[in-house]
Image (cartoon, rainbow, N blue to C red):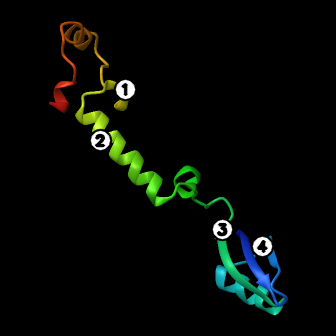
């Protein structure tokens, strides 16, 4: 049986978190309902998927970052696109004045 992590509120409105062994999510909801806990979030332990940096960033910050990155790439800034010069033959092209990888022209 899998272990589930859950977050919910009890009848007094206090947030309750914990882990519980249950055969399925629906069984866990029934078990917690008997304990008078209303589930607000539940996931199987070990199968959570978090994007901490993206989740913490707001829409405005993401829009500004994207806009600034595109301006830098359009301007030919090589620092915006890391590791685009893998072969030594291409390093010679850079020393001769090439500013972008041929794939970006």
Residue 86 relative to residue 33: left or right: left
User: Which residue, given by chain and number where applicable, does mark 4 sit on?
Assistant: 21
* Mark closer to the observer (3, 1): 1
Of labels 4 and 2, earlier in sequence is: 4
Circle 4/circle 2 CB separation < 8 Å = no
Measure the C-alpha gap from mark 4 to mark 1.
Answer: 49 Å
Of labels 4 and 1, earlier in sequence is: 4
Of labels 3 and 2, earlier in sequence is: 3
User: Which residue, given by chain and number where applicable, does mark 3 sit on?
Assistant: 44
Measure the C-alpha gap from mark 2 to mark 1.
Answer: 12 Å
Q: What is the x, y in percent for residue 76?
A: 25, 28
Of labels 3 and 4, earlier in sequence is: 4
Q: Quadrant of residue 103?
A: top left
Measure the C-alpha gap from mark 3 to mark 1.
Answer: 40 Å
Within 10 Å of disc 1 (Cα), the crowding (few <14, some 14-19, many 20+) is: few
Within 10 Å of disc 4 (Cα), the crowding (few <14, some 14-19, many 20+) is: some
Measure the C-alpha gap from mark 3 to mark 4.
Answer: 10 Å
Residue at 28% across, 15% down: 87
* Mark closer to the observer (4, 1): 1
Q: What is the x, y in percent for residue 62?
A: 44, 52
Of labels 2 and 1, earlier in sequence is: 2
Placement of the C terminus among the 4 image quadrants: top left
């Amino acid at each position: 049986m899998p272990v589930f992590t859950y977050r919910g509120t009890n009848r007094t409105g206090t947030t309750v978190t914990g882990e519980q062994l249950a055969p399925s999510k629906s069984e866990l909801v029934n078990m917690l309902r008997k304990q008078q806990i209303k589930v607000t979030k539940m996931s199987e332990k070990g199968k959570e998927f978090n994007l901490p940096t993206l989740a913490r960033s707001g829409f405005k910050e993401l829009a500004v970052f994207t806009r600034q990155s595109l301006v830098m790439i359009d301007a030919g800034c090589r620092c915006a696109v890391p590791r685009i010069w893998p072969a030594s033959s291409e390093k010679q092209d850079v020393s001769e004045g090439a500013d972008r990888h041929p794939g970006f022209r």
